[in-house]
Amino acid sequence: MPFTDQEISAINKVVTSFAPNTELAVAKFFEGEHQYFGTRCGVQGAEPVENHCSVFEIGSLTKLMTSAALAQMVCEGKIILDDAINSQLDIQIRDNQFISYAALATHTSGLPRLPPGLLWQALFKRKHNPYEAYLRDDLMHHLAYTIRLGSQNKVHYSNLGAGLLGHVLSELEGCDYSELLQSRLFKPLNMRYSFINWRDVAGELVIGIGKNGESTNNWDLGVLQGAGAVLSCVKDLVQFAKVQFAQTEPWVELQQQIQVEKGFEKVALGWFVLGSKSKGDLLYFHDGGTGGYSSVMLLDMESQSGYIILSNISGLHKLKGQKVTKLGFELMRTFKGF
């Protein structure tokens, strides 16, 4: 199903509300088939652009890939999902606390959203690349001496937890995070324009735009790459989505299983799940944002419909930071009629 005039109007309305050279790259799914639409804010307003192979930072959509690697390793018998990661660390976590693989993938580990001091770094010292200097020794020191775990009975979103998961999985495999995703996702799914380090990008890297319309630095995620380091394009993310739709791989089935359900809050491995299975309207969702980019992925697995949106809109806009996520839900409501 091609993009409708209503969808195109909604997409163009968002792109023209930002600085010149802002881009949106969109993939739409209908019954498993997909279409692309690209637009850029130009001098005369919205201009069509072919950007489905253009590379953007995807931010926290990376967490879906980290959890996909986890699900694969569980299915291969290398990990038991509810086992503690502690045996893989060379330190003892403060207060002899235990953290499971499942807890890291579902944001129920009790870890804070960010490592100690990182918010200060982001606001003042390293605001253009806040994670760059946060390395393995910092992570181990904070786990051993600084961080006191919060409640493990509630969902508390944690970039620190997702980054720790990616780090532990990589060490377990005896490789770095880039090699982990290359071997487990990028090569098997023919994701040719997906990378961990922006310096390795082949093809067109779309320049990120800051909250004041300025060009931004690309981010380096240090030891927390599993939380948000991936750069990719909508064409490659379509490949990831199609595997999710097909549900023929055991790891996909595991990744989509709801692990935590508290009231209306449902979390699978990496995915946030909206709606009700009894009503047949489950929607798997994640979004992402970095200093110069925003992204969202919304997939209805039953009807094999949904959207992927990548942009060079900063995720740090105080008032506009959620525009891409809101656009995704607007398109989904229009398409699905809810």
Image: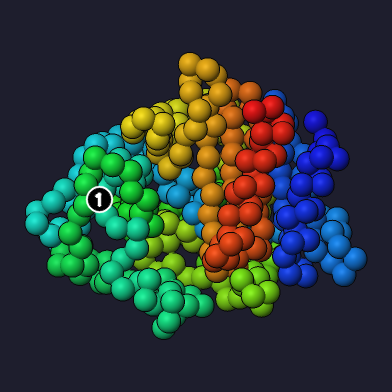
Q: Nearer the viewer, residue 109 or 188?
A: 109
Name above or below for residue 95 compared with residue 330: below
Q: Is residue 37 left or right of residue 158?
A: right
Q: Crowdedness of circle 1 by 10 Å Cα count: few (<14), some, many (20+)?
A: many
Residue most extreme to the right: 44
Residue most extreme to the front: 319
Q: Nearer the viewer, residue 337 or 260?
A: 337
Q: Give the percent coordinates (x, y) of residue 82.
A: 24, 37
Name above or below for residue 169 compared with residue 154: below
Identify which residue is drawn at 29% across, 58% down: 112
Q: Nearer the viewer, residue 62 or 119?
A: 119
Q: Give the percent coordinates (x, y) of residue 155.
A: 33, 43
Q: Give the percent coordinates (x, y) of residue 42.
A: 84, 67
* Image mark count: 1
Question: According to the image, label 1 marks what residue?
Answer: 110
Q: Is residue 24 left or right of residue 167?
A: right
Identify which residue is drawn at 45% across, 31% down: 256
Q: Secondary structure at mark 1?
A: loop
Residue most extreme to the bottom: 125
Look at the image and tell me in which quarter the N terminus lies.
Answer: top right
Q: Label 1 amino acid?
A: Gly
* Residue 7 visible in image: yes
Q: Give the percent coordinates (x, y) of residue 77.
A: 30, 34
Residue most extreme to the left: 95
* Residue 191 visible in image: no
Identify which residue is drawn at 49% across, 61% down: 229
Q: Quadrant of residue 94?
A: bottom left
Look at the image and tell me in which quarter the C terminus lies.
Answer: top right
Identify which residue is drawn at 78% across, 70% down: 20
